[in-house]
Image (cartoon, helix red, strand yellow):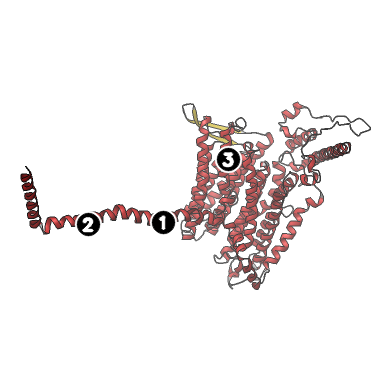
Amino acid sequence: MFKNSICFVSFFFLFLFSLINFFFFLFFMIYNYVIFLEWELISFSSMSLVMSILLDWMSLLFMMFVLLISSVVIYYSKSYMSSEMNLNRFIMLVLLFVFSMVLLIISPNIISILLGWDGLGLVSYCLVIYYQNIKSYNAGMLTALSNRIGDVFILMVIFWMMNYGSWNYVFYMDFMKNDYVMELMSIMIIIAAMTKSAQIPFSAWLPAAMAAPTPVSALVHSSTLVTAGVYLLIRFNVLLLDKFFLKILLLLSGLTMFMAGISANYEFDLKKIIALSTLSQLGLMMSILSMGMAELAFFHLLTHAMFKALLFMCAGVIIHMMNDIQDIRFMGGISNFIPYTSLYMNISNMALCGIPFLAGFYSKDLILDMVMMKNLNFFVFFLYFISTGLTMFYSFRLSMYLMINDFNLLSVYNLYDEDLVMLKSMFVLMMMSIFSGSMLMWFIFSYPYVIYLPINLKLMVIYVSLFGMLMGYMISSMEIYLMNKFSYIYNLSSFLCLMWFMPNLSTYGLNYYFLNMGQMMLKKIDMGWSEFYSGQGMFMIMKKYTIFYNFFQMNNNFNIYLFSFVLWMIIYLMILMVM
Amino acid sequence: MGHFLGTFQTRDLDMEMNLQPTFDSNIGFKTRRTQRKMVACEEDLMSARVPPQYRDYCAHILLNYLVCRYKHMPFVYKCAHEKHNYMNCEQADYVLRMKEFEREKRLRQREKRLKQESNS
């Protein structure tokens, strides 16, 4: 039964392609190969529309990761979505999503990038509204419309790029770097990437997109949708150096990781905490990218994809166990009932925090060391380190709530049995979460980074992590009466836990004033003065005069005829007398 | 961060971390300093497609590492020794540059002090 299902077939082929990609990656890496394929579709008035494919070690490695994660996510979905009536439709949507991402990865052409980019936006909308309730409709609309801003900017880049006669941006990046048009385009590309990677003004959609089924969250928030923006900027990296806007991006992405770290500590929804940690890591990637170290951003993107997918999949198992409850205050002691999942959850959490020799350590520690080696100001420096401490803070708090604290509310949730299908799929990612960091570190960096720091600066990461751990422990064991103390700083708390009011900015903030103005216009102008003067008013005037004339015409016409006859006779006589 | 510590109390000297030495290289030395020699030749670096930013005084050791990677791929961990050699060389290079920076800073301070003394 399982062998013939769409899940198994999709899993098999995606896994196979992933392995093939890995071997091609090794081959391309050894020989430093790049393959560029072009098909000219149409050529008109010195412009050519070309479908092109770029295969280099970067695109092959990224494709390998995307395909690996999507294959295990589909394998996992067989069990997670077993009560779903339309499983085929779900798997088709996921496959479409993966296809869009692959198209985006292998395109060096801005038009095919738009195709992949828009495909991601569209299919993510379909997946977010998959459960078809009001909450998911709203979340889907927010997701789709936020991403639409990025689509519009990519469209504008396409229009501007018409000046060059082709849309293969790779040809122009080195030669037209200082062109005014190219600078405009680079700003547009940065804004587009910021919408997809949910950087600060556009952050609200990422936690909202948690309305999607958990396997989709595992796929979307680890390796596909949110990393599309980072990948686009990695590809455009040559173009973006020494731009003023890039410095703004550094600030915004630094603030994003800080904001997400703070908000995750206030959050009680299991999936939202993980989503906010994704946002924090995205901020880290974008900020290191804005310092010009694209390889590091790519490295962190890959390792993060592994442990974040695993984290979401563990969250899915826990949500199943809890009878679809996502609030962590109801959870506790789950390691007694689902030990393997708890093990995976702990490993992925530790990898996220950068505990030495797990995947996250290699990328995150390298990034922080490079930050220390760079000439940065203190503000950015502290943003990085406080955010690293906050990562430890919310991860430890989450672990405490889930595993160490006593269980709450439900008395029968220990009846759940761990599912072998889910465990097998998570096992693959668990192994990757442990080994991928070291493996990629050896593979990717042909030219190693040199780090040379004072011992205390080097140990700064450990210091902030230990402090974060302590804070996480204290917060998770907080007594209920301490909650009352938060009422003193209610305004500050609500500011921090509502992501600096960014959901309001993206939803009410954008809609409210315009809708309110529209309603005012409707009341005051459409239904008010214009009605008074034109519609109803004109009718009333007409009616009044019609009644007035009717009075002459219908009721007293004999008198009026007589009166006018006499009047005319008098006038006539007077004329005669004068003459 | 390094910039903050490295230029502490020398803001008035207008120094940046990536500054080139401006004084004569032999001031204050009893022996004559010789210029460093580039070991790796340009042809080798070009044929190995080493990017320009890595063509420094450690490039010959880097070439060893790259050759080792080529030979042992995908078992790149076997090149740990070569990688460590390269890192050591780069570290020594970094120390040298920082010493030059410190020398530049002290020479500037000295120049400033001498100027103030002559004015007063």
**What label does residue B47 carry, if any?**
none
Q: Which residue is mark 2?
A: A544
Image coordinates for residue A407, horizontal then vertical, percent:
63, 71
Front label number (3 vs 1): 1
Q: Which residue is mark 3?
A: A187
Is residue A384 visible in this depiction of the protein? yes
Amino acid under disc 2: Lys
Nearest the viewer among A293 and A38 is A293
Q: Is residue A56 above or below residue A522?
A: above
Q: Which residue is mark 1?
A: A520
- The CA distance from mark 1 to mark 2 is 30 Å
Picture mark count: 3
Q: Which residue lies most toward the right here?
A: B30
Q: Chain of mark 2?
A: A
In the rendered image, which quarter is residue A343 located in?
bottom right
Q: Which residue lies most toward the front here?
A: A578
Amino acid under disc 3: Ile
Q: Earlier in the sequence, mark 3 or mark 1?
A: 3
Q: Are marks 3 and 1 on the same chain?
A: yes
Image coordinates for residue A55, horizontal then vertical, percent:
60, 36
Q: Is residue A536 above or below residue A193?
A: below
Rendered residue at 10%/58% (across/down): A556
Pointer 1 and pointer 2: residues touching (CB < 8 Å)? no
Q: Chain of mark 1?
A: A
Image coordinates for residue A33, horizontal then vertical, percent:
65, 33
Q: Earlier in the sequence, mark 1 or mark 2?
A: 1
